[in-house]
Structures are given as structure tokens and as C-alpha cells.
Amino acid sequence: MADSNSGTTATDIITYIGVPLAVLGVLPILYNTIATLAALSKIKRMLRHSKLTALTRSDVVNRVIEVELPRYAPAVRILAAVETAQPDPRGSWTTFNWKTNTIGIKTQRVEYADQLRQPQVEVAFDELVSYLLDLGAVPDPHGWKLLRSTGLWTPAGCALMTARGGQKALSIAPLDDSDGHLSLAVNWMPSWTTRDFSSLPPYWVRLPPPPKRPDGPGSAEASSAQDRPETAEDREPSKKDAVSVHSQGSRDSIQKQGEANAVKPITCEISVDGLVTAISQEADLLRSDSSLHSLFIGHLRARRDKQDGVWFASACTAYGTTSQTMLWNYKIPDEIFIFARRDTVPCGILVLLGVVDDAATPEWATKHNAIEEQHEQFVRQHTERQLAMRSEQQMAPADRQRAAAERMQRENMQRMQDMRDRMRLDRQRLEAKESEALQSPKWDTKLVAEHNLRWLKSRRAVDDSLDSKEACGALLHRMVLDGHFTSSLCSMLDLWKAWADNGGMRRSDYAVLRDDPETFAHASLLVAMIKDATTASDERSLSVELQECMGMWRTVRLG
């Protein structure tokens, strides 16, 4: 009971003490409510500014805001213009204008607006790298080596791609929200772009056409056809000609298209598995009438039963390899690299083929003085003939006549026998020389290609103005258009690699080269070019690391 003398009642105590205490107890709830509503308003404003569609829920008592944001899978190769890169809660991937596809919903529980983050997007790793390469970014060898060896434990901030000036274009990001995926961050400024429409995309290579020749093939046939006098059969139309006029027009159209492709550059796309696309295009893309024409590449596709596609893709990759550019997507097989490095062509075989002068090679064959041997044989036979004729002079006329007839018969038989002996000796010596040529010192592939290039130029099979690399480009251009030539060339490469793997060239291998030395000369140009690509050891190592990393992580998270 309250003290009546003091005048304080229980009601007064509740009024002056209990009510303020109750108000104080409600204040945190009011504060949480106000703070939550303010944060929710800021989040909604941020979502509107970022043009993001999201579902929001708030718990004012516990001061928790739930935001359901969509997770995207951008289409990397369908990017719009590059925007200015800036720190943004939406994530570094918003540096670009992506064409996105929604693949799910990510729920985030935050207390403050600055805790909200756009969910990481899922991107195809190879397409992302390809796009950055297309803009002008350069792979960082240290970053890719570290990623290959340490995987998800690669330190955050480690650069994988750098832009002009060493700026980080693609780097490792923290593993938040990555769900076990590789987490990356991207950064790009418009001023960093160093490539334009005239630059080839990554994994593409341009093959130049061979130089034009005024005396091209078929000109003689065409002129002879024009000079041929008209006959009655030419003037009289036939039913067969009327029926075949459409097919003849189709053949003429195909022939014209083939002639047009032969003088246009060809661009080839090389994937992990080899050639994907070959396109014939005008040299000047700025022309209004420039056109693209997709070419048939069935004879160059990778197949299990034939190595033609592997040889072409390897040669194309080697042709497209420079100190600044590398076809990262395709890995030349190790067995082809090893084959290209080995010395496998005996120098004596090149002498027998007429490619190299004997004086330019080390001594490898037994020397025979055929002129001296023939002179000794002539002197011996002449002496025997003189002695026989002197003996005949001492005989009676009848015996002299009979002895002279016998001597002449013996001389004729001796001449026939000498001819047979000479042919047999020449054949034996040729076989011996071929055996010695097969055992002669083996030359470096590049040296073989240099001699073959001079030999091809002497036969007018290659234009005199072309160097080795340019000749290889024209050769690859021809391989795209001529399936029969490609088959012959790749068969020669298969034969060459086979004797290199089986201990050396045999007589049967030399017989093939002797029957078709020009195809072997062309093959040597390609092998030498592949060998030159092996000297870029750092670039090849980086290529392998890129391929293995992109093989381990097909899809990555980009924050």
C-alpha cells in the first residue's frame, strides 16, 4: 500500500515510472522499424537506378530485409557497347552491357543497403577469355600458371588478363556466392580497346591467296579453243545440248565461284578440335559490294580414320603464331611437335631427287670414275684388236678372211656383253648409291625446306616473291579449296612421320618421293613452319595452361 502521509499512490508510481519505462522498451522497436524502412527505401531506390527487378520483404522487429534477385547467364559474344567501369554493388560484370538470360533466384538477407550485392553471373570461361582477347587484353602467364597449379586457392586479386598499361582486365575474386565455382572479376575501360573491325577474332587466321599469274593454268586450252575453226556440228543445235543447258550453266556458275575463291583471302576458325569454319572474303571489307562465302571443309575436319584435319589445324596454328598472337584454342599434338623437331631426311636423298647439289652435302657416297674405266676398257679392246689384225696379216688369204669374220663376230658379241655388263654395273651402283643415300647424314627440317623452296621456285611451282611463311599461307589456302591436293599432301606427311617413327627412310619411302617430289617439297614447308612454332616455348606453355584451365572450369562465376 502506498504511504497516505506522503501523498504518493500506486497509480502515481505506474504513471511516473512505469510509463516511461514502457516507452523506453518500445523505442528500439520503433528505431528498428524506422531504420528498416529507410534501408528498404534505399534498396528499392538502388534497384530502380540499376534497372533490376527484385522481390523485397522486411522484418521490422528483427531488422532484416530479404531481397530475391535473379541470377543471370550472360551471352558473352552478344555484348553491346562498353560502358565506363565504376565500383558498383551490382558487380564488376556490369562493366559491359550484357544480353542476359535468367537462370534462377538468389535470396539475400541484409541489414543495410550497402550490404546488397548483385548475384554473380554464370559465364562460359572460354567465351569470356575470347571476348577479352578480342578487345585487346593479353593473358598474364604468371596468373594462369598459378591458377593451373593452385585452383580455387589462387589468391584473390591475381590477374589473369591485363590491358594496356598493365591494368587488370580479369582477376580472381573472393569465393563469396561462388558455390564451388571459380570466382572472377572483370574490369575494362573503352580507352583500353586496341582492336577494331579489321582485326581477326581470337582463334581465327587469315590465309592469303597465291599471287596472280598472267599465264595461269587453262589459258592455253582456252586460247586453243577460241582459235579452233567453227564446224557444222557447232552450228547445228542438238537435243542433247538443249537438255543439258541447265546443268552446263550450273557447272559454269560453280567454276566461276571457284575461280573467284582462288583469288580471295580465306579466314579459318580453329577450335579445340580443329577447323570449324572457312570463309572466303573480299580483301577490302570496306567495299559496299564485299561479300562472304562459306567454303566446303569436309575434307579438313578432324576424323579418327584420317589425319588430314590434324595436319591442317596444326599447320594453321603454326602459321597464326607470332610474338604477339597465339591461337590459344588449339593445341598442336605433342607427337607432331616431336616429329617436326627431329632430323629425318637424309641429305643424299635430296641429291638423288635433284633438289640439292652433291657439292653442298657432306661426303656420303662412294666415288666411281666411270670415264676412266671406259677409257681403260677401250684401250684394252683396241690393243687386242690390233694384235688380232696383225696375226691375220700373216695368214693365207682364205684363213685371213675366215679369221677376220670370226674376229668381227667376237667383237660384236663383246660389245653386246659390255653393254649388258655396263647396264648391270650401273644398276648395282645406283642401288648401292640409294643405300648409301638412305644412310647419309640427316638434315634439319628447316634446312630441307629452304632447299625445297628454292627448287619449287626454279620449277615455277611457287612465286619467286614469296618467302617461306608466305608460301605456307598460299599452300594452306590451296588446301582449303583443293581436296585432292590436300589428300596427296597429307598422305605424304603421314608417310614422312611414319618413317621418322619407325627408324628411318626405306627404299619404298624413297620410291614415293621419287614419283612425287613436288608434294614432298610442299610438305617440308609445312613441317618447317610447325618446327618454328615450337621455338616459342613460353607462348606454347601459356597456351597449354590456358587450355587446361578452361578445360577444368567450363563455367565460372563473374562478380
Image (cartoon, rainbow, N blue to C red):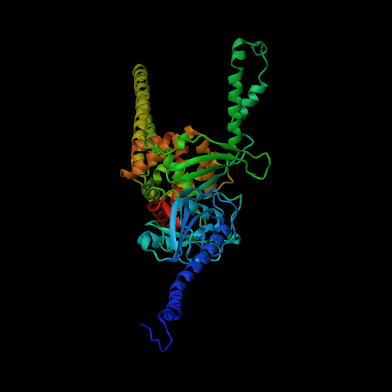
Name the spot of residue 420 as percent of width and height, x first. 35, 28
Residue 535 visible, this orientation? no
Against 521, residue 220 (above or below) is: above
Q: Is residue 426 left or right of residue 227?
A: left
Total numbered labels placed on residues in the image? 0
Name the spot of residue 320 as percent of width and height, x first. 50, 49
- Residue at (52% x, 40% y) in the render: 278
Name the spot of residue 232 as percent of width and height, x first. 66, 10
Farthest bottom residue? 5
Farthest front residue? 4
Residue in front for this viewpoint, 283 or 536: 283
Name the spot of residue 506 as percent of width and height, x first. 33, 39
Residue in front for this viewpoint, 251 or 26: 26
Residue 449 visible, this orientation? yes
Residue in front for this viewpoint, 18 or 374: 18
Against 56, residue 165 (above or below) is: below
- Residue at (59% x, 28% y) in the render: 255
Residue in front for this viewpoint, 309 or 87: 87
Q: Name the image quarter holding the N terminus.
A: bottom left
- Res 284 → quadrant: top right
- Residue at (39% x, 50% y) in the render: 337
- Res 280 → quadrant: top right
